[in-house]
Structure formats: C-alpha cells, structure tokens
Amino acid sequence: MEKEIIFKQLKEIESNLFMDENMGKHVSFRAGGKADFYVEPSTEKNLINILKFCQENAMPYYLMGNGSNILVRDGGYAGIMINTKNLQDIQIISNGISAQAGASLGGVAQQALAGQLEGLAFASGIPGTVGGAVVMNAGAYGNEIKNVLEFVEVLNEQFEKETFLVNQCELGYRNSIFRHKNYIILRVNIKLSKGDYNKIKDEMEDLNHRRCEKQPLSFPSAGSTFKRPKGYYAGKLIDDCGLRGHQLGGAQVSEKHCGFIINKDHATATEIEALIKLIQKEVKQKFNVDMQTEVILIGKC
Ligand SMILES: Cc1cc2nc3c(=O)[nH]c(=O)nc-3n(C[C@H](O)[C@H](O)[C@H](O)COP(=O)(O)OP(=O)(O)OC[C@H]3O[C@@H](n4cnc5c(N)ncnc54)[C@H](O)[C@@H]3O)c2cc1C
C-alpha cells in the first residue's frame, strides 16, 4: 500500500498523526531520524484501533512514552511510532495511585505529594512516563519502580486486557518482561502509604537538587547511557579511560558526569552511536568490562 493511502486511512482513526516525522523532536536526545508515521492517540480506543490497523496491514509499530531512553537511528524507523503522551489520566485510589501509561512520573509524584502519599519521591526527577518506567524498572537513589508497583494492566497481541501483578512483571535492573514480550502497558497501579506532606516535599527537593548538581541537565541526553556493570561504576570506567569531555561530532561524554553522553551541538544519532561504540571498545580494552547500553537504539543506520 502506498504511504499516502496508509496515512489517509490512519488519519480516519486518529487525527494526531504525522508522516515522515523527525523523531529528534520527540526524544530527549533531540537527535535521530524520521519515522514513516508518528501518532499520539488521544484515547485508549484509538490506540487499540491503530494497533489493529498495524496487525491487519503487517505494519511495524513501536510504543514510546516520553522518549527519554530511546534513540531512533538516522536512517529512520520504517513503521509507526506510537506515543502514549495523551493517555495521562491519574487517579488517587485507596492505597496509592492509578495512572494511564502516558502519565509523567513527575506528574504522578506531584499528585502523590498532594495526596500526602509516600514512596514515589525517588522517581520525581526521572523524565519518563509511568509506562516507560515500568518497562525499564526505572530507579534512582537506591529505590526502583519494583518497590512501589502493585500491578499493570496490559494489552496482549490478541488485543485483550490482562493484569500483571508486580511479581509477574519480572522486574530486574533496568529490565522487565515487557522488554522481551509484546505487551502494551495501558495502566499502572502504584501502592503508596500515608505520609507527611512536608517530609515528602523535602525529600523530593533534596533528590532533585542532587540531580541538578551531578547531572548535565542543561544538555539533551537520555540520562545514563550505560547500565552499571557489576562491581563498577560506568562513569568512573569512562573517566579512567581518559574520555571525560571526549567529543565526536556533536556528541560528547559529559564533562560533568562521564556516565552521560550529551548532545552538545546538533549531534546526529550516528555520532552518538559511534561515541557509544568507542567507549565500549576503550573500556573493554583497558578494563576487560562489557558496557551494555541502557539507552535503546532503534531503526536503520
Ligand atoms: C536527564 C535524564 C535523567 C534520567 N534519570 C534516570 C534515572 O534516574 N533512573 C532511571 O531509571 N532512568 C533515568 N532516565 C532514563 C529514562 O527517563 C527512564 O528509562 C524512563 O523510565 C523512560 O521512560 P519513557 O516514558 O521516556 O520511555 P521511552 O524512552 O519512551 O521508552 C522506553 C522503553 O519503554 C517502552 N515503552 C514505553 N511506554 C510503553 C508502554 N506503554 N507499553 C509498552 N512499552 C512501552 C518503549 O518501547 C521502550 O522500550 C533518565 C533520562 C534522562 C533524559
């Protein structure tokens, strides 16, 4: 089917649809190629209908949240990128919060604060959606989503809703069952306990202050580029290879925090990936340690 015809048919399902969309606009690295199609479903029903369209037409799709841990290579994505950002209903429930997958973690943490609910302060500065946070088992300051998750509601490949209790999600270090199996997270239930407003607020402010001090937040990035290798710190290994501030095109190892690759100056995804590979090679040569990326690269070179 021709691209224009696909576009017309998809547009009948959802109007927030774009063709040949520059994905650099939608990922936190502010770099990368185009997607054939990019859609922001305005309702869960539209999301499901888009997925059905993809299945009927054998069209590849990729679910994204806030794009704070993904990079689309410069050759682009041949298919449709589906962004959950409009599915952001947040409800305070008896023992916590129930939020649609596209709700921002920061927003959910703010709602928890307003409801004097304790347990999510650690996540308030992670710039992802709750859906993305479950997929990645996002964590910070000794805590992780696994510790507060109760259950998620997902859509399976037959477009049926299923519930996964926390112990069925196989949550590990920046890992979950959802990274390996084709489920779409629709809703996330987080269990929290009653706390003191000022104490929660102070904790959030303290952690966010620490983030600002340590991390290069004034440049686009995807946070820590690499997972922490067992027994080491990624940033220290990179620093000890003499790569602090090393620049490749517009991509740079942050001077402030070597664990972050930043988009210093109009970096391309190719430059970012080349810098990742250079770091992996140098660290392997010098310390015999394999550096696995935390950031997920998709699409064609
Ligand atoms: C400045 C900065 C600081 C960061 N700090 C931290 C930190 O402290 N701790 C940490 O863990 N991470 C951190 N990150 C990384 C990132 O924010 C987290 O990994 C976050 O959880 C990703 O969420 P997202 O919504 O942006 O997901 P995306 O990057 O859009 O997607 C990540 C993965 O989740 C999948 N996905 C997203 N939504 C769904 C869904 N509804 N259903 C199925 N699959 C889905 C995608 O397909 C992809 O595989 C940081 C990033 C930045 C830029």
Image: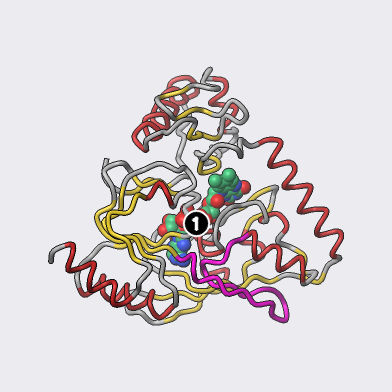
- The amino acid sitting under disc 1 is Asn
Q: Quadrant of the C terminus?
A: top left
Q: Depth check: 5 or 292 in front?
A: 5
Q: Position of residue 97 (x, y in %)?
A: 66, 73
Q: How many marks?
A: 1
For mark 1, what is the residue?
A: 66
Q: Does the beta carbon of the residue at mark 1 sit less than 8 Å from ligand 1?
A: yes
The spot of residue 149 in percent (x, y) is 62, 67
Q: Which residues are magenta?
A: 84-105
**At 26% from the left edge and 70% from the top edge, which residue is drawn?**
54
Task: For mark 1, give the secondary structure.
Answer: loop
Residue 43 horizontal side relative to residue 12, left or right:
right
Query: Can the viewer see residue 69?
Result: yes
Left or right: where 122 falls relative to 60: right
Q: Is residue 38 left or right of residue 174?
A: left
Residue shown at 77%/72% (left/top)?
115
